[in-house]
Image: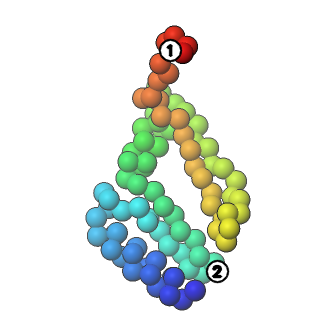
Amino acid sequence: MQDSLEALLEKCKEEMVNENTAFIRSVQITPEPIIFLATKRQFIDIERFCWNSANFCVLHVDATFELCNYYPTFARYRNLILGTIIGPAI
C-alpha cells in the first residue's frame, strides 16, 4: 500500500506543474485515501453549463458505489452545445 501511495503522490507532483493538463486535482491520505480527478475542460464546461442562468443544466452527483476495492463518485452534466440530429431511420 505504501508504494502505491508514494507513486500516486509522485504522479500528483508531476501533474501539478501544469494546471491546464493536470488530471489529479487533490489527494487526501487520511483518514482514508481520497483522490479528486478532473480536467481543466471539465471545470470550464461545468461553469459554462451549470452556472449560466441563460443556458442552465443540473450538475448530478451520483452516489458512491463499490468497484473492486474502490468507491468512485461521478459527477455529470448535460453538454448544451451537443444537439440531437434528427434524420431518417435506417
In the drawing, does residue 8 fall left or right of residue 75? left
According to the image, label 2 marks what residue? 31
Going by the picture, which residue comes out furthest to the left? 18
Front one among 17 and 52: 17
Q: Residues within 10 Å of mark 1 (few under 14, many from 20)?
A: few
Q: Which-is-in-front pick, marks 1 and 2?
A: 1
Q: Quadrant of the C terminus?
A: top right
Going by the picture, which residue comes out furthest to the front? 90
At label 2, the amino acid type is Pro
Q: Secondary structure at mark 2?
A: loop
At label 1, the amino acid type is Ile
User: Can you give x and y, in whole percent of width and height, for residue 45 in the image?
Assistant: 42, 42
User: Can you give x and y, in whole percent of width and height, for residue 69 in the image?
Assistant: 67, 71
| Up/down of 60 relative to 2, above or below | above
User: Looking at the image, which residue is at 38% across and 48% down?
Assistant: 41
User: Can you give x and y, in whole percent of width and height, for residue 35 in the image?
Assistant: 53, 68
According to the image, label 1 marks what residue? 86
Q: Quadrant of the N terminus?
A: bottom right
In the drawing, does residue 67 fall left or right of residue 46? right
User: Looking at the image, which residue is at 63% across and 57% down?
Assistant: 73
User: Looking at the image, which residue is at 54% across and 40% down?
Assistant: 77
Front one among 17 and 86: 86
The mark nearer the N terminus, 1 or 2, is: 2
Q: What is the quadrant of residue 39 in the picture?
A: bottom left
Front one among 1 and 88: 88
**What is the CA distance from the residue labelled 1 to the residue labelled 2?**
50 Å
